[in-house]
């Protein structure tokens, strides 16, 4: 029997945590529950120490971002684009809080571009965060987004949509 993307993600992340000596259970949420269509995998904090949680969230979620990068790369490797499933790893409400911050940043960038008519760059975003901001700004038909630069200095650019003649 084939596994769902949620089951594959849950199993993969559970195994990674086991190998890392982190005794956290993983709960998978429905893909339909989130704006970016990703499968959210939430780590249960009940069996983690405060120090373990702090280390996973330190440096603006860098460890969580790395784990998320690994799961997305590993589970989507070799799959056609239309079959790929984005995964988001949540811990202690960090991703939900960050998603709200990103929505506010996207709205502020949209307002700035509309006010000035000039492009606006958002820096210091991970690739997953840039994807989220691109998704948030899709609803603004008068704006377009793209990424510029190379990692680790890749930036998301918001600009007025060009009017086709």
Image (cartoon, rainbow, N blue to C red):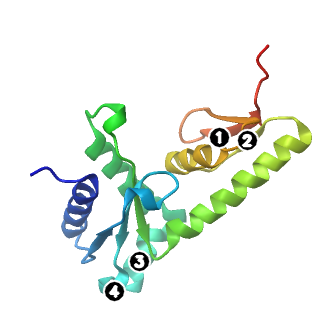
| Extreme residue toward the left, this view | 1
Sequence-wise, the earlier of marks 1 and 2 is: 2
Q: Give the SS element for disc 3.
A: helix
Q: Is residue 12 above or below residue 92?
A: above
Location of residue 100 in the rendering, given as x and y in whole percent from the top left corner: 63, 65
Identify the mark nearer the N-term, 2 or 3. Answer: 3
Is 3 placed above or below 96 here? above
Res 55 → quadrant:
bottom left
Circle 4 sits on which residue?
A: 46
The one of 20 and 162 positioned closer to us in this rendering: 162
Q: Is residue 11 visible?
A: yes
Dot 1 or dot 3, earlier in sequence: 3
Where residue 124 sits: x, y (%)? 63, 50
How far apart are the alpha carbons under marks 1 and 2? 6 Å
Between marks 3 and 4, how big is the CA–CA gap?
10 Å
Look at the image and tell me in which quarter the C terminus lies: top right
Q: Which residue is mark 3?
A: 53
Q: Secondary structure at mark 1?
A: strand
Q: Nearer the viewer, mark 2 or mark 3?
A: 2
Q: Image point 30% across, 31% down: which residue?
A: 80
Residue positioned 84% across, 47% down in the render: 112
Q: Residue furthest top?
A: 165
Residue under label 1:
156
- Neighbor class of circle 3 (other Cα within 10 Å; few <14, some 14-19, many 20+) is some
Q: Marks 3 and 4: which is nearer the front?
A: 4
């Amino acid at each position: 029997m084939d596994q769902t993307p949620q089951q594959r993600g849950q199993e993969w992340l559970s195994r990674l945590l086991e190998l890392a000596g982190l005794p956290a259970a993983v709960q998978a949420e429905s893909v339909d529950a989130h704006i970016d269509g990703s499968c959210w995998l939430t780590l249960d904090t009940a069996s983690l120490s405060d120090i373990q949680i702090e280390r996973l969230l330190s440096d603006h979620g860098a460890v969580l971002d790395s784990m998320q990068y690994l799961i997305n790369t590993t589970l989507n490797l070799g799959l056609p684009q239309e079959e790929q499933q984005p995964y988001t790893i949540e811990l202690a409400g960090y991703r939900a809080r960050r998603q709200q911050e990103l929505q506010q940043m996207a709205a502020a960038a949209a307002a700035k571009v509309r006010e000035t008519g000039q492009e606006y760059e958002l820096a210091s975003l991970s690739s997953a965060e840039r994807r989220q901001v691109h998704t948030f700004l899709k609803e603004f038909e008068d704006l377009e987004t793209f990424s510029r630069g190379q990692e680790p200095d890749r930036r998301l650019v918001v600009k007025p949509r060009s009017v086709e003649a």
